[in-house]
Image (cartoon, helix red, strand yellow):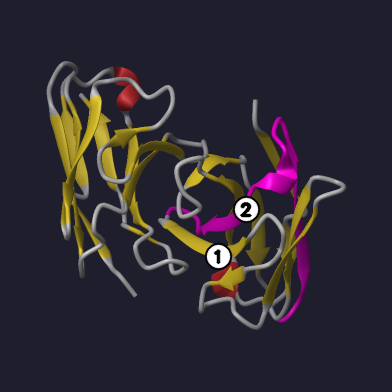
């Protein structure tokens, strides 16, 4: 059974940095691409970043490009998101999600999320 | 960027009724559209992928249809547990994945 657990969220000032982690279990992590998706409080879903299973392809949403860095450690079954130059509009619940079996472009399953609040 | 517009914003129906949710794309996404269900306080769950394929473990009362720019998610006979927000999402413009704004389904 796939299990994804995010951590690292918290309160940070604008311009600050935060590093999120996602611990994966229940599947062969090194075989699957992974995503980060976020959801501002009371709002909809926004895709943030993707990393291929072997790190050969990495993509970002325009809204975070140049500020966020996605990475993974296949030996530790962990996915990370380094967030720099944070803005108030980055405040959201951040989910990690495994690529769906049907396609890398879908998300299945999702973790429960970790909350990031950017505020002075 | 492909914009997905969902309607209605809220749907209020009684148990046993049929719910039809709409998702319209700003340009063709072929059949590369998924639907997710998000219950309060929970993460989203994949229901339908590639417009009409049910994900593993999804009840048969959920079905998807459409292609190009117009898509529908139908819940054939609503149950109280179906109360949730439903999102559509396209993968045609990979890697720029986008979601619709969601439809809230309320059970009377």
Is label 2 on the same chain as label 1? yes
Is A102 situated above or below A40? above
Q: Residues within 10 Å of mark 2 (few under 14, many from 20)?
A: many
> Can you see residue A93?
no
Marks 2,1: beta carbons within 8 A: no
- The structure residue drawn at horizontal position 16% and vertical position 23%, both measured from the top left corner, is B76
| Front residue of B1 and B91 | B91
Percent position of residue B69, x then y: 16, 60
- The structure residue drawn at horizontal position 62% and vertical position 53%, both measured from the top left corner, is A33
Chain hosting mark 2: A
Q: In the rendered view, does A106 fall on the left or right side of A79?
A: left
Q: Nearer the viewer, mark 2 or mark 1?
A: 2
The residues tagged by marks 2 and 1 sit, at their Cα atoms, a distance apart of 11 Å
Give residue A34's mark.
Answer: 2
Chain hosting mark 1: A
Residue A30 highlighted magenta (yes or no): yes
Q: Which residue is disc 1 drawn over?
A: A48
> Can you see residue B83?
yes
């Amino acid at each position: 059974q796939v299990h994804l657990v995010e951590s690292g969220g918290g309160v940070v000032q604008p311009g600050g940095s935060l590093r999120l982690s996602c611990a994966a279990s229940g599947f062969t992590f090194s075989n699957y691409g992974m995503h980060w998706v976020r959801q501002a409080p009371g709002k909809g879903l926004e895709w943030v970043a993707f990393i291929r299973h072997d790190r050969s392809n990495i993509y970002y949403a325009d809204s975070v490009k140049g500020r966020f860095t996605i990475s993974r450690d296949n030996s530790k079954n962990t996915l990370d998101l380094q967030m720099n130059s944070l803005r108030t509009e980055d405040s959201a619940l951040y989910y990690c999600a495994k690529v769906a079996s049907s396609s890398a472009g879908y998300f299945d399953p999702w973790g429960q999320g970790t909350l990031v609040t950017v505020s002075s | 960027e492909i914009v997905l517009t969902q309607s209605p914003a809220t749907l209020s129906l009684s148990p046993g009724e049929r719910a039809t949710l709409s998702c319209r794309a700003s340009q063709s996404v072929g059949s590369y559209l998924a639907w997710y269900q998000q219950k309060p306080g929970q993460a989203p769950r994949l229901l339908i992928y590639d417009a009409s394929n049910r994900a593993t473990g999804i009840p048969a009362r959920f079905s998807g249809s459409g292609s190009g720019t117009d898509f529908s998610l139908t819940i054939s006979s609503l149950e109280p547990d179906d109360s949730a927000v439903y999102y559509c999402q396209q993968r045609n413009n990979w890697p720029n994945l986008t979601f619709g704004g969601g439809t809230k389904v309320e059970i009377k």
